[in-house]
Image: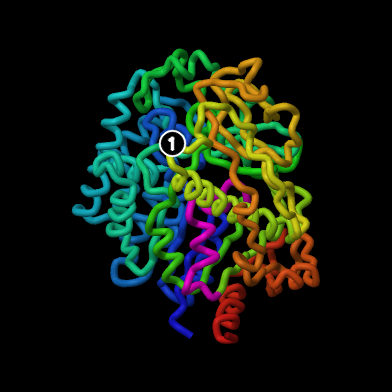
Amino acid sequence: MDRPSFIVFSGGTACNHIANAFQGITPSVCYVLAISDNGGSTSELLRILGGPAIGDLRSRLTRLITTDGNDVVERLAIKELLSYRLPSEGSESSIREEWYLIVEGRHRLWQQISVEKKETLRGFLVAFNSEILKRAHKQFNFRNGSIGNFFLTGARLFFGSLEAAIFLFSAITGIREPTHVLPCINTNHSAAIAAILENGQVLRGQCEISHPGQSTSKSTKVMNPIDAFSKLAMPNSPTQGDDADKNANLIFNKSEDDKLKSAIRRIYYMNEYGQEIYPLPNAKVITHLNSRNFLIYSIGSLYTSLLPNLILRRVGAAISNSPTLRFKVLVLNGTPDRETDGYTAMDFIGTITNALNESQLIDARHKYYDAMPSDSAEYVNHYHHADAYHRPVDHGFRQWPPPPPAPLCTTAAQTPQQLPQSFELALPPLPFKSPSIHSSGASSPGYRTPPFPPELVPNLPPSSYITHLVYLTNSKIPVDVVAIEALGIQCLPVEGERAASMPQYHAEKLQHLIEKLLTSQ
């Protein structure tokens, strides 16, 4: 077959452990990562400066820094610098003082870095520090701060481009094409996700879904509607009570066993007021899906790391219709987490299938409404019921269609006229509730589009998106091989780390399995 070339959808941490399985086969690997994380050092950057979450991108970039060649000492030093975090404990003044040692070039971390690279790196740290000083009234908290995150942010703000910042990072650290690290959305703005649970509860932001902060309330209060619409239409405009104490996501612990009250029904992107939005993906992601031959759905958080890449417009169609993708491999997690407690391998497959079908549904709706004449009778200023249509659920997966996102100031999804939740399509929340909103022939300015024809609802089978399932022989997530292979998905077991206390992939053994798969077809 052609030379292998990978495109890997993943989060930032888990995939780092198995990156060598792909890099050991070929340097032609494209990593696509979400930019919707709002925890840790990233959360403070979002609070003060806004912009996309770059923590997972920085994590993958530093992981890809090679430590071979003639300049191994310097590369190790640069990797240590860009991986370094300021202390999470201690006095605020001591943590800030250490930051000043770094930004002024007096810290021990600079000792093995050449002058030209030191001054290049330091220049963007200075630019970042300047932006922080401009917003001194917001009291930036340097606790647990990632120097790599600060560098990427300084470069992004200087160039006005996230991809330019990634290019600079790669150039300085020696990460060369054909290895690519791409944000799933190419933007200078923040991207946030929300989850609807089976019980109707809505969780807003990745931290609340995946790893609540130390002081996060169990029942997170959403933005007051008066505060929401008091903000100026400018990024990062000040709001009442805007202070450092508001950041409960700065320190968190993913290992804490704090289970969700109900299973996750659906993930969606939202704007700052909690309304669902449909972002377009980075155009380069679609290009790579149409030119590479091996797709990996990597290990990591299913709903907050993997799905934010998949629910984007055009991604489902690109994966199912790619002229080059021969292998579409799901590497199954070894253990469940807060998001997937009680899941089987079939649940992972079903969740990914529904997400990619939903991506295609957004495309289908866009095409349908775009082709409708603006003077069509369907666009008469009447409210319509939410799209209510049956979708065949012939693979035994979770409910479809999903319920709509909750209105701005509630925590449960609203169902017009008590229509069954499983037949409600997500629509923007209405600015007000009128007594006659759902009455027959009720006239109004018109906020909703005509019903979408049920025959146009995408319902591609799992085998359109997944051809192989790789799982650990000692996996704690049940794998029904017979049922999965009946869907047209081949199951491939692999032995993990023998010395690990929990099921964990061994990068070299995973590499051998992939190589065997490549040579078998």
Q: Is 274 in front, or is 249?
A: 274
Residue 326: quarter of image: bottom right
Which residue corresponds to the image point at 55% horizontal and 50% vertical from the top-left?
A: 311
Q: Main secondary structure of the magenta part?
A: helix
**Image location (x, y in percent) of residue 264:** 69, 42
**Image location (x, y in percent) of residue 14:** 57, 56
What residue span does the magenta drawing correspond to?
302-326
**Image location (x, y in percent) of residue 15:** 55, 59
Residue, disc 1: 375
Above or below for 12 versus 178: above
Residue 139 among magenta residues = no
Residue type at mark 1: give it.
Asp
Q: Is 297 in front, or is 396?
A: 396
Which residue corresponds to the image point at 68% horizontal and 38% vertical from the top-left?
A: 424
Seen in the image, is 411 located left or right of residue 394? left
Which residue corresponds to the image point at 48% horizontal and 77% vertical from the top-left?
A: 25
Which residue corresponds to the image point at 66% horizontal and 62% vertical from the top-left?
A: 332
Number of numbered markers = 1
Seen in the image, is 61 located left or right of residue 450? left
